[in-house]
Amino acid sequence: MRWSIFSFSKPSALAWCVALSAALGASGTARADIVQPNGTTIPAVTGRLSDLLNGSANNDDIDEMIDVVADAAVEPQVFSPLCEFSGKYIAKGGGANFAVGWYNVDDSRASDDPPKYVSVDTGANLNTAAPESDIQILFPFSTSLPPAAMRELTAVSIRESPAYAGGLIGFVLIPNPNGTGNGNATQYHYTEHRFNVACTACETPGPWYSDLIYRSNELLNTFYLGFEDLDFQNAAGAAGVNGNDLDYEDFLFRFSGITCPEAGQPCEVDENVGACRLGISDCDAQGAVICTPFVLPGSQAEQCDGVDNDCDDVIDEEAPCPEHQVCNRGRCVDRCGSAEFPCEQGFVCQGGLCVEQACVDVMCEVGEVCRGGECSAPCDGVVCPHDQVCRAGRCIDPCQDVVCNSGQVCEGGVCVLQCNCRGCPTNERCDMASGRCVEAACADVSCDEGTYCREGACVDV
């Protein structure tokens, strides 16, 4: 399979995870142990959590090869749901009666006014959210691990829920309003730290971490969430932990079809060149946005297509072409030097290519071309029409030969989910007709053929 910016096929989950691991390693942000405000590294108890994540039947025999200490994270705190959302209730190591749910993130909401669950009633409809409820239930209240048939969420679409506000979501462990069966298990536990109990007297004052997050190494757009279920207190030392064993498998879930904020958008890896520059946005263990390349350096051979396929900063070097042809500006063309293929006036045949007379004795740096006797980058001075890019001195549509799967669209040569399933970056809106993100100012603007919208106005292509 050849991956290039002209014809990109999404890599396998394994290849994608390799690329993501490389991107995480190159992001410049070293992973660090997660430490509670009182100085305790978490998880403090590791054996069962590691067993559950790495090859257990509870986790469908998926061996994630996760180091539960080194790979632990508390970011992202909020997520963007995709259209294809699913969940797995992996384990319940605690005995308290809780449910798990989701809520719409609202940055304007005060930290002392966290989202709350309101049920239709506290009897038969306990697991049905009332219209005024901030939280929607995913897995219902229970004191033990549900039967196998009730541990899977396969027909749930958060994006299609009437309660979904269209933005980011958080997850929360919800105490049973009828009582959890444990007087020391009464608190909500949010993935947004600001809503959790803080320790102001601790060594490093801040909210207690009642959940840990692990990114899947095997499944795309998948995270594991492990919760503690007992209450935390505003007190230093063991008093603040208040009986929690910090093993983070009191409630353990796997959620697929979620990404971190700003993920899933086309991007460029600044330090990479050629085909290795193009990628898709993601986040690192600290929640910072990174760009994960689709192609790793040296993973593919050079082709005659105007692209630096092997990412060595040289375009089309020694690119293969059929016999009697040579690679020129991204295309295999017939060799000059015969009466059948003469050069135009002002050009001479050199190495099978027609070269400007003024450039015959000019030696340019790697990656440059000669024009009129002067060396320059191939795309210097080239202005391309809207939605085209310059490659090897030619303007091309990067999506021209790209075939995307159902539910995807091509943006900048990359197949991405339609925007109604992934959301759009800040200052952009989803054009439902095309499935692409557009400038917010252009979302309701319709332009005539030969023009396009820029900053809310139609301009010539």
Image: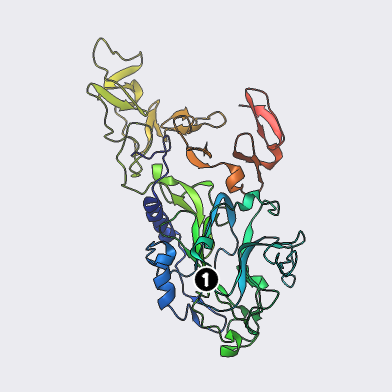
State which quadrant residue 260 falls in: bottom right
Identify which residue, 334 or 290, lies in the foreground.
290
**For the view shown, which residue lies furthest in the left direction?**
323
Query: Residue 402: percent from the left, percent from the top?
Result: 45, 33
Q: Quadrant of residue 324?
A: top left
Q: Nearer the viewer, residue 14 or 381?
A: 14
- Toward the top, the furthest residue is 339
**Which residue: 70% across, 74% down?**
177
Where is the N terminus found, in terms of image quarters? top left
Residue 354: horizontal and vertical position, in percent?
31, 20
At label 1, the amino acid type is Leu
Image position, residue 114 (x, y; %): 71, 69
> Is residue 56 placed above or below 158 in the rendered structure?
below
Q: Is residue 209 visible?
A: yes
**Image location (x, y in percent) of residue 252:** 51, 69
Horizontal arrangement in the rendering, residue 230 relative to residue 71 (left or right): right
Q: Nearer the viewer, residue 29 or 103?
A: 103
Task: From the viewer's perspective, tell me whether residue 329 is left or right of residue 110.
Answer: left
Foreground: 51 or 141?
141
Secondary structure, mark 1, is: loop
* Residue identified by numbered label 1: 145
Instruction: Name the image quarter holding residue 138.
Output: bottom right
The answer to whether residue 68 is visible is no
The residue lying furthest to the right in this view is 132
